[in-house]
Image (tube, rainbow, N blue to C red):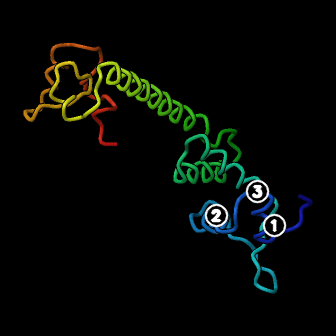
Amino acid sequence: MNGEWLRTGEVAEAAGVNTQTLRYYHRRGLLREPRRSNGGHRLYPPETVTVLRVIKVAQRLGFTLEEVADLVEATAHRHGRPDGGLRARATAKLAEVEQKIADLGTIRETLIQAMDAGCDDLVACAESSRCPLPFSDPDGGRHAASRQGEGGRRGAEGDPLHSQS
């Protein structure tokens, strides 16, 4: 970028996004208001390309657009502070990612146990004492097999297999 103002298509192409994405990010407040040419075209400063690349990388790292907006806002208003809040936010995001990895490990183990137990039909499996799946009884208790302690972590509160998400 040579310091010249860029039109919407030029910014989008340089950042590797489409023009609809650029406009969407603008509406979401992730980008500063562009200047207008005499012909009414939006003109963006070259650093907009960097901001767009940052947004896309942050999304790939698992940050939501709302979280990205907070990061961009913190950076824009840091007033000489060396940290725009990335370290704290990255630490929190890392904890989320590690929890998701742990949850996926639990799901993986339970699926392997279900396959090893020969579960081929969910209804039949739910009625079997060999079933490793964490079914709940109508009274809120765990599946009989889970209460008997067969197979490890099944049925634990906070288990990803019990969450609604």
**Mark before the other along the chain sequence, 2 or 1:** 1
Could you tell me which quadrant the C terminus lies in? top left
Q: Is 119 or 149 nearer to us in this picture?
A: 119
Question: What whole-number distance in Å separates the C-alpha atoms at marks 2 and 3?
Answer: 11 Å
Q: State the residue position of label 3.
A: 15
Q: Position of residue 3 (x, y in %)?
A: 89, 62
The residue at which mark 2 appears reads as 21
Residue ID at (55%, 44%) = 63
Q: Disc 2 and disc 1: Cα gap in Å?
A: 13 Å
Residue at 21% from the left image edge and 18% from the top image edge: 130
Please rate how many residues cluster around mark 2, counting C-alpha atoms within 10 Å: few if below 14, some from 14 to 19, many from 20: few
Q: Which residue is found at the position 69% from the left and 68% from the top? A: 19
**On screen, residue 68 above or below 98:** below
Task: Give the mark nearest the N terminus, 1 or 3.
Answer: 1
SS category of the residue bearing label 1: helix
Q: Nearer the viewer, residue 53 or 33?
A: 53
Instruction: Out of 26 and 59, give the one closest to the viewer.
Output: 59
**Badge 1 is on which residue?**
10
Answer yes or no: do the residues labelled 2 and 1 have beta carbons within 8 Å? no
